[in-house]
Image (cartoon, rainbow, N blue to C red):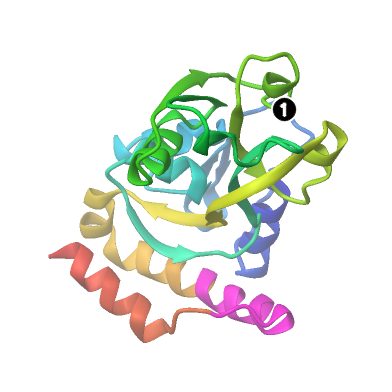
Amino acid sequence: MLDLTLDVFRRAGYALGSLSTESRRLVFPCPEIGMTFLIVRPTDVPTYVEYGAADVGIVGKDVLMEQDSDVYEPLDLQFGACRIAVAALKGQASRDRLSSKIRVATKYPKIAERYFNQRGVSVEIVKLYGSIELAPLVGLADRIVDLVETGNTLKAHGLVEVECIAQSTARLVVNRASLKLKHAVVTVLIKKLWVVNCVLGSRTGAPRKSLRGVRRTVKRART
């Protein structure tokens, strides 16, 4: 989501200087706007923000659901849309009803276990870090839980989507202490990103939270 994130910040009026997706640098000071940008792995964003190494961050909702990080989440930026889905080999969609326990391969063990437990289905979770679609093909798992955008990768491996667990989009997250200590700066950032969000949303018809609603949640988070 880096290119989309940079585009949103530029649209919000933040001059990003030499910040580029082509660079190997991970730290980009932007003194003209009083900010420093860090480029980190998506799964690390909540950790940097929660522990105060970064005041704010942008990360997918899927990561937030999996990690349960103690960060404030004031804004859904609506880009990077995809879904967390359960998938199985075509023709095996109802196997969980026939077996006392199913094996699920995923890089989202907490999300997967919570989802199946809520439905009373006994599961064995197999944690993988990539190539999740291979697991049913080689008999490693009966199901997978993975992030799906178009579904083309599933189809290419003979898999079908069984259930959608949740929708995932890019979220702005804020360190709770920073929200209090740097309230003015953080609030201006949220407002500017919200305006861009509304402009882009008007082109797609996607619903947006009102600025008053965002302000109310910011106020609640400070108390």
Query: Label 1 sits on what residue type?
Result: Glu
Residue at the spot 50% in from the left edge and 45% down from the top edge: 62
What is the residue that sits farthest to the left in this orientation?
Answer: 223
Residue 190 or 117: which is nearer the viewer? 117
Vertical comparison of 179 with 211: above or below:
above
Secondary structure mainly formed by the magenta segment: helix
Mark 1 lies on a secondary structure that is: loop
Image coordinates for residue 22, horizontal then vertical, percent = 79, 35
Residue at the spot 27% in from the left edge and 44% down from the top edge: 70
Image coordinates for residue 205, horizontal then vertical, percent = 67, 83
Q: Residues within 10 Å of mark 1 (few under 14, many from 20)?
A: many
Q: Which residues are magenta?
A: 193-207
Instruction: Tell me if residue 194 is in the magenta stretch.
Output: yes
What is the residue that sits farthest to the right in this orientation?
Answer: 156
Instruction: Tell me if residue 95 is in the magenta stretch.
Output: no
* The image quarter in which residue 179 lies: bottom left
Vertical comparison of 99 with 116: above or below:
above
Residue at the spot 73% in from the left edge and 81% down from the top edge: 203
Vertical comparison of 208 with 47: above or below:
below
Which residue position is annotated with label 1? 133
Residue at the spot 77% in from the left edge and 47% down from the top edge: 151
